[in-house]
Image (spheres, rainbow, N blue to C red):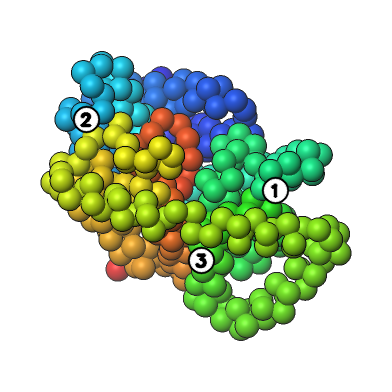
Amino acid sequence: MDGVTAPGRAALLAAILGAGLLVAPEPVWALLFYLGGLLPFLARVHRRDTWPADAGGMAGVALIAWFTLATAWDQAADGRLGPHLLWIWNGLNTLAFFLAARAAFGTAGEGRERLVSVLTGCGLGNAVIGLALSLLRGFPDGRMNGWAETRHPILGAAIIAVVVLLAAGRLLQRRAPLANGAVVAVGLGFIVATGSRGPLIAVAAALALLLLGLRPRLLLAAIPLGAAASLAATLVLPRLPAMLAARLLARGWSSRLDIWTLALHESASRPLLGYGPSARLARAVDNFPHDLFLSTLFYSGAIGLALLLALLALALGAAWRAQPAVERWTRLALLLNLLLTGVSDLSQVTKGPGPMWYLLWLPVVLALGAPVPRR
């Protein structure tokens, strides 16, 4: 495994990330990562160049290590070995992905370009499959469920938002306008069809930031264009607007305020170390904090939250310094999408192959490795 060249590992990891959007069920995709991502990492773990020397990379490793260590005082495990081993395994896989992605996509070049091409192409395929299956099923629960790693309406919409932003960055560079325009249009349709309000607000704000930074005049033109797109969707699916509005209004706040209040209250009892990653809030349902920052505080305490905030601050700083402008604003848009999505959703920062890799770790890797001007 150690004999594979760096470009080969980058191509393999990009293919694995693309497969996550097309291959189902989840264990099949996870096996692909174990073979093509985890094993190469383990073969190189003893090498000094495997480990980051920069502040952002070290902050990422520290966050993963601390969150994994939190299983040592996880009271919810109740003396069972299984939960501890699960979170150690999750930490190992997240560490392998973070470091492999840093090596593959952490600098501007062919690896990063291939990744964007793979994600936009596979993301378009995922959105088409999800929309087609939902149309065939007639939206039985009023919300669209996606395919493969987008099968959860909220997390799936947030993942497709990442794909939309990558395609939008290329579209604003006038690169393959038809293909990237299709990714943006179909991806936004996918997000709307899921009825997920948080991701919809997040991607709208991120797209507005992208346009503000690169094409401010287009931002003004986007308003009538959006109205025209909505009208077209209504003509094709007359019942869709009423159905979506009913679903959005019926859910209200989805108990978010109660959940966040409870998470803060319980976190106050173990403020420094947290409860460990297997812990659950004292609720019969929705028993996790539904917020990336409160979740990190609840599971790994103030130390874990400080590490997360440090990592995000370093990522934002690196993205802001990036050149050319399209690199800067695309990465800032990806981070804004992460921050806004994280406010209303997301949970443990270390997981096995799954949505958090697309939603948290990949945007952070891309931001930390954004190209900077030469001096």
**Which of labels 1 and 3 is toward the front?**
1
How far apart marks 1 and 3 lie (CA) works out to 26 Å
Could you tell me which residue is drawn at 37 percent across and 51 percent down? 259
For mark 2, does the 10 Å Cα neighbourhood hold few (<14), some (14 to 19), or many (20 or more) residues? Answer: many
On the image, numbered disc 3 is attached to which residue? Answer: 206
Of labels 1 and 3, earlier in sequence is: 1
**Which of labels 2 and 1 is toward the front?**
1
Q: Position of residue 358 (x, y in %)?
A: 48, 44
For mark 1, does the 10 Å Cα neighbourhood hold few (<14), some (14 to 19), or many (20 or more) residues? Answer: some
Of labels 2 and 1, earlier in sequence is: 2
Could you tell me which residue is drawn at 48 percent across and 40 percent down? 355
Task: Kindly tell me whether residue 116 is visible in this rendering.
Answer: no
Callout 2 secondary element: loop
On the image, numbered disc 1 is attached to which residue? Answer: 142
How far apart marks 2 and 1 lie (CA) works out to 38 Å
In the rendered structure, which amino acid carries the disc numbered 1? Gly
Which numbered disc covers residue 74? 2
Could you tell me which residue is drawn at 57 percent across and 41 percent down? 152
How far apart marks 3 and 2 lie (CA) works out to 36 Å
Q: In front: 201, or 88?
A: 201
Q: Quadrant of residue 114?
A: top right
Callout 3 secondary element: helix
Quadrant of the image containing the C terminus: bottom left
Callout 1 secondary element: loop
**Which of labels 3 and 2 is toward the front?**
2
Q: In front: 316, or 108?
A: 316
Whether the residues at callouts 1 and 3 have beta carbons within 8 Å, the answer is: no
Q: In front: 45, or 310?
A: 310
In the rendered structure, which amino acid carries the disc numbered 2? Asp
Q: Quadrant of residue 319?
A: bottom left
